[in-house]
Image (cartoon, rainbow, N blue to C red):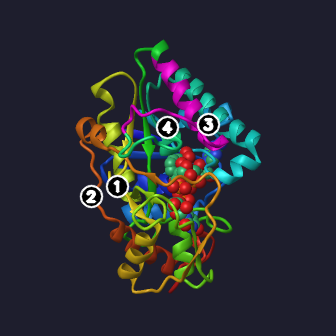
Amino acid sequence: MNVLLTGGAGYIGTHTAVELLEAGHGVVVADSLVNSHEEALRRVERITGRAVAFHHADCTDPDALRRVLSEHEVDAVVHLAGLKAVGESVAQPLRYYRNNLDALLTLAEVMGEFGLRDLVFSSSATVYGDPGTVPIPESAGLESTNPYGTTKLFIEQILHDLAAADPSLRIVSLRYFNPIGAHPSGLIGEDPQGVPNNLFPYIAQVAAGRREYLGVFGDDYDTPDGTGVRDYLHVVDLARGHVAALDHLADSTGHRVYNLGTGRGTSVLECVRLFEEATGVHVPYRVTERRPGDIAVCYADPTAAGRDLAWKARLTVADACADAWRWQSANPRGFAGPPTGS
Ligand code: NAD
Ligand code: WQD
């Protein structure tokens, strides 16, 4: 099938494009490049030997989306476009609500105009807030703790209402846990702007000597070593989850929701150790204050995705460490700079 990937130039989008192309699908990307570089898509083409149709388009612009869908025969949409920085969303809530909600509403309207019924949406484990129990099933209570998370909750609700109003729609929301790592080629990976918010890009930049040490945000949580525990998922496994969701869209109608996670939790200090073992590079760290809003433990119950989508994470945190380091070492300035050796 021919798939429109909104936000396809980003971290998860480029890896999803690779897996879709390698599964024999066609890929059309619409991205505003607000947090990405077109070069990332040229790298996708290098990895796969296949062309990607790129449109510099903002999903909040209906005419731009109409132009994309007029030019290409698209069968299904994977909607990854969105702003994703939790702290930034607290400081700029209007920007997050406007961009993330408007992009979804505009896309859904234009999909309707073109008779498109199949949609996969990037949701997040953030919709569980501070979970009561782990592993977290999809039936767990939902709560939002920041405007970014609220956009994911609102969008899931909108998709639920759309599917209830039109039974011919087939919609899947994928609740990602913590994506990490990079494509094993070292050609694409996470390319954060400024100081990284997330653990793994920070570890990689400390290892590369760009930052002095990792701040470990608290070691007094109720966890085995006192540091926060998360479900870290290799981005290539996550990308494969989108292919699986598209493959199974025809199986039922309505709006369905799946966790994409490994089902295993790893602490911050375990991540540091696994990274050091996988790369042979020392990662100095200092325990600092807890980060406001952080929770102690979060990991998925991925049973439903295994049962309905025949999807299961295959790669390990150690694999992700090795792949992230290959990407970081070969591209010290991300997509903005030349790769080392070129
Ligand atoms: P990313 O920032 O690398 O990719 C998002 C892409 O969307 C970027 O290329 C950006 O330029 C584009 N974009 C943003 N607003 C747009 C708009 N209005 N129109 C067109 N393009 C727009 O982030 P990512 O990590 O690849 O995340 C992809 C999706 O997955 C996001 O919706 C994010 O909320 C969700 N998600 C990410 C994580 C994570 O930890 N990375 C976890 C859960 C969910
Ligand atoms: C992981 C662990 C930190 C950085 C965030 C979003 C979530 C989702 C994924 C989009 C925690 C600790 C981190 C550092 C540290 N994104 N840490 N030092 O917070 O689980 O989830 O990204 O949907 O919505 O909230 O991921 O990578 O920021 O943190 O000690 O410099 O690492 O305290 O325990 P998080 P993270």
Distance in Å between CA atoms under marks 4 and 3:
29 Å
Residue that mark 3 sits on? 151
Looking at marks 4 and 3 on the same chain, the residue that comes earlier in the sequence is marked by 4
Residue 72: which numbered mark, if any? Answer: 4
Give the magenta-colored segment's residue range. Answer: 137-163
Contact between marks 2 and 1 (CB within 8 A): the answer is yes
Contact between marks 4 and 2 (CB within 8 A): the answer is no
- The quarter of the picture where residue 215 lies is bottom right
Residue that mark 1 sits on? 237
- The quarter of the picture where residue 184 lies is bottom left
- Of the two numbered discs 4 and 3 in the rendering, the one whose residue sits closer to the viewer: 3
Residue 314: which numbered mark, if any? Answer: 2
- Of the two numbered discs 3 and 1 in the rendering, the one whose residue sits closer to the viewer: 3
Q: Is mark 3 within 8 Å of ligand 1?
A: no
Residue sitting at x 60%, y 45% = 82
Looking at marks 2 and 1 on the same chain, the residue that comes earlier in the sequence is marked by 1
Looking at marks 1 and 4 on the same chain, the residue that comes earlier in the sequence is marked by 4
